[in-house]
Image (tube, rainbow, N blue to C red):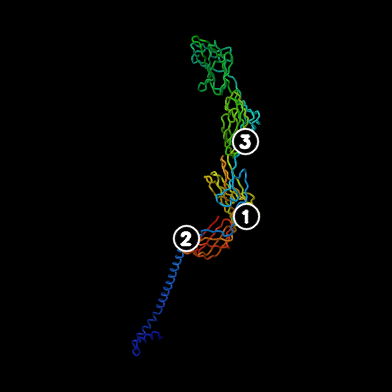
Amino acid sequence: MSVNYKYCFLFHNVFPKGRMNEEVMMMAGCMLRSFRRDERGLSNIIVVALGLVIVVIITSNVILWGYEMNQLDWEKMRENIAIASVERVGDVWHYNASSYTLLGFTSWVSGSVPDLASDDGVYMTFRSYNSGTDTSDSVDNNTSDVDSSADKGTHSSFLAQQVGPDSITDTLSETNTASGSQWVSPTGYEDPGDEWSSETGAYDDNIGTRAVDDVPGGDTWSQYLVLNHSSLTCSRIQYYIGRESTIINQVEIDIYNSTWTSVYSGTGVWGSWANISFTATSLTKMRFRFFNDHSSQPRMVYVYEADFLEGVASNYELDLEVQWTSVDYDETNEELCIYTGAMGIEDLRVDYWTGSEWSNLLTDLTANDWNNVSISLASATFTIRFKGGSETGDSFQDNWDIDVALLHAWSIGYASAVEFTGSSNMENWSQLNWNIDSAWTTGSVSVTLQLYNYTLDGYPASGNGYITYSSDSTSNTDETGRQIINVNPTHFRNATGYWKMKIIGVKTTDTQFDCRVDRIEFEVMKATGTTFTFKNQGPLTCHLVSLWVTNSTVHENQEISIYVNSGDTLLYSRMDIILPNGPHTVKVVTERGNIAVYSRS
C-alpha cells in the first residue's frame, strides 16, 4: 500500500508524538482512501474554477473595450472643426490706368487719368452720344406670291414706289374678274292692287307693247307692278317706261331677295332704255310704281319692257402684293409708310402677311398724304398687299396712285464707351483682380465692363474678362464692378505687360447722360504659399493630422500635427503649398476621423 506522506505529515502535526495510536492510524488510513477516491472530482472542480476565471477576465476586457469605443464615438460626434478660409500668400502688385481712348462719339467732360488711382469721389467724366438708329427702306419687289393666289389688277410703274415722294406714282388699277352675263326677261307678274292692264306687255321683248296703269289724281302713287323670275344672280336691271304727261314725275323701283330693297327713287328716264346697277345678289322680283302729281285728274303711265341682267357683267377687283426682303427688324420703333397721290372712289385696303394669313393694317388710304401705321417686324421679309374695298359686284373700275412705300425703323438711346490702358509686370501670376468703380448721371443704365484677352485677341462676351449689370435706379450712385480671375490670368496682358479694359453704358432714352469713373484697378498676385484658417467650434480639442488640396488633376496630401483648442481659431501657413488655379477643394482630417471641407469655384 502506498502512503501519501503529505497527509501523514499533516496528522503528525495534529497529534503530538507518542499519542499516535492504532485508532488514529486507522482514521488516517480511511481519510487517505477517501482522498484517492475524490482525486478525479477535485480535478474537475479546479478546471471549472479556472474556466470561470477566464470568462470573467474576457468579459471584463470586452466591457472595458466597449466602454472605450463608446467614449471614442461620443468624442467624435462632439468634435466640430471647420476650415474658415483658405488664402493664397504671395506678392501682390496694384496698377492703374495710364491712358484712355474715347469710343464711338463719346466726349470727355472733365477730370484726368490720375483721378482714376483711388476710390475717392474724384472722377473722370465722359458724355454719352445719341446711339439711336433711323432707317428707311423702300419696297423691294412686286413678284411675291405668299398666299399662292395670283395677283388681280395692274401696276403702271412699280419702280415709282421705290423712290419719293416725288409726284411720280405707280397707278394701281382694278381688273374685271367677272365670268359673263346676259339679259333675261321676267316670266310672270303680280298686280296686287288690280290696277294694271296688259301686264305681260312689260316683258315680251317688244317695246311696241306695254303694261298700262291709269294713275288716279290727287297727288297719288300708283299700285305696284311686280315682275317675277326664278332665283337668279343679278347686279343690274334695265327698263323702258313712258307717261301721258310730265305730271307723272316720280318713279320708285325695288328688287326682292327675302325683303324688298329700293334701288331707285327719282324723276325717272322716259322714252328710252335706262340701267340701274347694284351689288350682285340673288333675287326673284322687281317692282315699279309711279306718282301722279295732279291734284284731281288721272294720268296714264306705261312699262314697255323690263329685264334682269343674269350673272355679273363686270366685277372689278384689286389684289396686288409688294414685298421687302432685307428688313431691319430689331429696332424699338417700326412703321409702314405709304405716300399717295390721287385715290379712287372705292376704299383701298392694306393688309400684311403674318406667315399664315392676311391681317389688315389700313382700311383706306388718304389721298396726297403720308399714311403711316405701326407694325412689329419679325423677320427680314415683310409682305403687304393692296386690296380693293369692294370686291363683289363691283361694276366700276377704280384706280389709285402710290408715290412711295417704305418701312421706317428707328430706336432712341444714348451710349458712352471708353477704353483704358495700363501697364503691369511679367511675373507668373496666380490671380488677377480687376475692377472699375463708376457712377452715372441717370439711373438704370445697362453697363458692360470688359478686359481684353490677348490670347483670344478680343474682348470677351462672357466668362472671365466680362461683367455686366444694370446700374442703380438712383442717379450718381457709385458702384464697383469686380472680377477675380484664377484661371490663366496672364492671358489678359500682352507680351510687354500692357492691359486694357473698357466701360460701356447704354440706355433707351432721349436724354443725354454722363459716365463718371472714379477708379480703374488692375491687381495681380504671384502665389508663394497658402494660409489656412481652422476654427474649432466644438467642446473638445481637435488634433489635425492630414491636409488635402485637390482638383480635377491635383491630389496633394500633407501630414500635419496641429492642435486647435475648443473655441479657438488658428491660422496655419504653408509656403510649400501653392493652391491650383481654378476650382479646387481643401480637406483637413482630425485624429478622431472627422473631415472638414472648403471648396472654391
Task: Please provide percent x and percent y for residue 584.
Answer: 56, 57
Where does label 2 land, which residue? 537
The answer to whether residue 452 is visible is no
Left or right of 28, for residue 143 = right
Amino acid residing under circle 1: Ser
Amino acid residing under circle 2: Gln
Real-space Cα separation, disc 1 to disc 3, in angstroms: 48 Å
Task: Please provide percent x and percent y for residue 559.
Answer: 55, 65
- Residue furthest toward the bottom? 18
User: Split into 4 quadrants, where in the image is the C terminus?
Assistant: bottom right
Give whichever of 375, 231 is nearer the camera: 375
Left or right of 51, for residue 264 = right
Q: Quadrant of residue 9?
A: bottom left
Give whichever of 500, 60 is nearer the camera: 500
Real-space Cα separation, disc 1 to disc 2, in angstroms: 43 Å
Mark before the other along the chain sequence, 1 or 3: 3
Mark before the other along the chain sequence, 1 or 2: 1
Q: Are marks 1 and 3 in contact (CB under 8 Å)?
A: no
Where does label 3 land, which residue? 136
Where does label 1 land, which residue? 424
Amino acid residing under circle 3: Ser
* Above-or-below relation of 85 to 125: below
